[in-house]
Image (spheres, grey):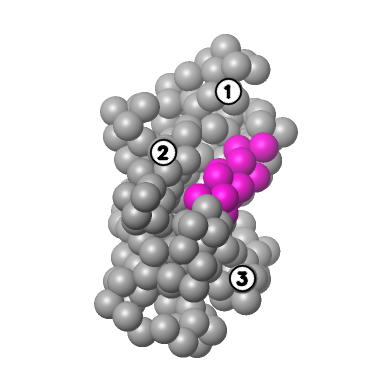
Amino acid sequence: MNPWILSIPIAYLLGSIPFGYLLVRIFRHEDIRATGSGNIGATNVARSGAKGLGIATLLLDLGKAYLAVRIAQRLAPGNVDLAVAAAIATILGHVYPVWLRFKGGKGVASALGVFLALTWPSALCILAVFAIIVALTRYVSLASIVAAAAFPLFGFHFVQARTPVVIFGFLFIPALIILKHHANIGRLFAGTENRFGRTKVTA
């Protein structure tokens, strides 16, 4: 079977598994979409009072994305275009999951997962950027935005391929993440965005 026909649907379906929603539903019998920002990602899960579930959500969202790209790489070794296309499909699955009427997370943890599979040095660099911004400001949203914006700089440095698919993917994924943070950007400019560690949820 054509690896494209197999890899892309697998990547989307793996990406669309809403771990944050499932974990809170199973262990707390609550709908995370009715809590805080309503986002199904790790930050909102943690801020809802379930820090352990937040960590689990982070790791599972990262893991599913990493696995999706690794499957594509295994099906077509050396095909960078397919791996990047699978990464795009994974992020689209997470952000627009079919199971939750296409209303998902913001893609930060899943983006780290696909970047680890595509170019782990770049992923470590943006993880360091994220950690520094969080340490300095305690704004998870700002750290996510800055790290996403920085990825193309590292990605194009460490990945030599310059195909249209690679260029598009390395720009599209960060752009989508930043776009999904539009409400956070507004609150950052207004000075009303919550810092990580506070109990009130607006992220």
Q: Nearer the viewer, mark 3 or mark 2?
A: 2
**Residue 198 shows in this picture:** no
Q: Nearer the viewer, residue 162 or 30?
A: 162
Q: On the image, numbered disc 3 is attached to which residue?
A: 120
> Label 2 sits on what residue type?
Leu
Q: In the shown orientation, is residue 6 left or right of residue 52? A: left
Residue at 58% x, 29% y is 48
x 46%, y 63%: residue:
76
Marks 2 and 1 sit apart, C-alpha to C-alpha, by 20 Å
Secondary structure of residue under mark 3: helix
Callout 2 crowding tier (Cα within 10 Å): few <14, some 14–19, many ≥20: some
User: Circle 2 is placed at which residue position?
Assistant: 13
Residue type at numbered disc 3: Trp
Please identify the quarter of the rendering in which residue 113 is found.
bottom right
Q: Residue at x 43, y 47 (%)?
A: 11
Q: Is residue 94 above or below residue 88?
A: above
Question: Residues in magenta?
Answer: 56-69
Direction top: furthest residue: 29
3D distance between C-alphas at marks 3 and 1? 30 Å
Mark nearer the N terminus (3 vs 1): 1
Residue 160 screen position, x and y as percent:
46, 87
Q: Locate residue 161, reporting x and y percent.
A: 41, 83
Q: Which residue is mark 1?
A: 24
Q: Main secondary structure of the magenta part?
A: helix
Q: CA distance from mark 3 to mark 2?
A: 23 Å
- Residue at (65% x, 45% y) in the render: 59
Residues under numbered marks 3 and 2 in contact, where contact means CB atoms less than 8 Å apart: no
